[in-house]
Structure formats: C-alpha cells, structure tokens
Amino acid sequence: MAYYFLIAQLPQLHYGQEPPLSSAAFLERYGAMLSKPDAALLSLCRLGLQSGEASEPTSSAFINAWCARERVLTLTLAKLRAAKLQFEVLAAEIPDGLDEVKTLAKAAFAMEDPFEAELFLDKGRWDAIESLVGLDYFTADVVFAYFLKLLLIERRSSFKSEEGFAEYKALYAGIIESAPKAGANGEAT
C-alpha cells in the first residue's frame, strides 16, 4: 500500500536534532492512516530486544531485517557484559551473520564513556535504518523507518548528562550513607 499523503505530511528528521513530535503524537496523528496489517507491524518498530521476544518472520522485509539486527545487537552486548562480569554465558545463541552489528556492539562496549557508547550505537542504528529502507519512498517501510528514527532522536533528547551525573552522585551518596560503618574493633555498627 502506498502512503503518499501520510509521508508527505511528515516533518524531516535529522540525526542529533530535537524531535519535531513525540512517538506518542506520531501514533495518535498518523496511526489511523495505516492499514491494519501495517499498524500491527509498526508495533514491532522499537529499539532493543524485549525479554522473551521471538523472532518470527513478518510480511515486511524491512521489519524482519530490523528485528534481526536488534536481536544480534542486544544479544552481543549482553554476552559481552556477562563475560566481563564473569557471569554464566547466555542461553540464547547469537544468530550467524550480521558481523557489522557484532562489530558495532564490540566497539561500543570497548568505549570508556557509557554516554558516548550509547550515542555511537544510536548513530549505527540510524545508519542501518537508512540502508534498510530502500528507494521506494511512499511505502510502509518508509513509515516504519521514520518511526524508528523518531524513537532514536526522542531517546537522544532524553539524555541529560548533567542531570544524569547529579542523579549518580545522589545515588552514590545514599549508598555510602546507608552502608554499615565499622566500629573501633572493625565490626559493623
């Protein structure tokens, strides 16, 4: 199905900008313009892998590719974190292929600054969306890609480094204050 009217109304998105509308506003404003099958597929457009989520193929090659990519990214990051913490390795197997996604995850994991790693991952996601969407501009895939990009810039705009650092300091101070203190003989008081 072609979505000429819907796509023509969408404000342009650029990586790093403030979102022109929220994802909730997008769904409210444009969700009813989608066919029922496409609206159902739009619900699969999200960042990350949900717990227990199956990777059932859909009627959309774009959605299938996106979900496979997110699955590999999420599982690779989880496996790297588990190995670093010396936890038991995950039961879920990382699918073969998508080596560029595994490389992206490893590069992000190696970064010292978690904020920079998140930005790096999101830029990789943005680039992947652009490469997956194809050239037919008025299809449901363009709507799906737009929504995913909107989620990415909405997520990025929610990052507030100063507020995050202040929250970290407050949490850390609370942990230190509530920790048992050693008395003169070395026992906790």
Image (spheres, rainbow, N blue to C red):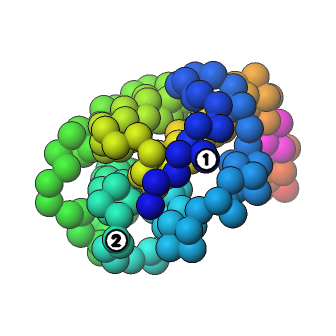
Q: In which quarter of the view is residue 83 placed?
A: bottom left
In the image, taking residue 8 as reference, residue 142 lies left or right, namely left
Which residue is found at the position 31% from the left and 38% from the top?
135
Report the residue marked by disc 2.
Answer: 59
Give the Cα separation between the discs numbered 1 and 2. 21 Å
Report the residue marked by disc 1.
Answer: 6
Viewer-nearest of discs 1 and 2:
1
Residue 51, percent from left and from top: 50, 71
Residue 170, percent from left and from top: 83, 36
Secondary structure of the residue carrying tag 1 is helix
Amino acid beneath label 2: Ser
> Quick check: can you spot residue 61?
yes
Amino acid beneath label 1: Leu
Q: Quadrant of the C terminus?
A: bottom right
In the image, taking residue 90 as reference, residue 29 lies left or right, namely right
Give yes or no for contact between labels 1 and 2 (Cβ–Cβ under 8 Å). Answer: no
> Could you classify mark 2 by the number of other residues whose Cα lies within 10 Å: few (under 14), some (14-19), or many (20 or more)?
few
- 6 w.r.t. 114: above or below: below
> Could you classify mark 1 by the number of other residues whose Cα lies within 10 Å: few (under 14), some (14-19), or many (20 or more)?
some
- 123 w.r.t. 155: above or below: above
Q: Quadrant of the N terminus?
A: bottom left
> Quick check: can you spot residue 148?
no
Magenta stretch, overall SS = helix
Q: Earlier in the sequence, mark 1 or mark 2?
A: 1
Which residue is found at the position 50% from the left and 73% from the top?
37
Q: Is residue 58 magenta?
A: no
* Residues shaded magenta: 170-174
Q: Is residue 173 magenta?
A: yes
Residue 161, percent from left and from top: 69, 25
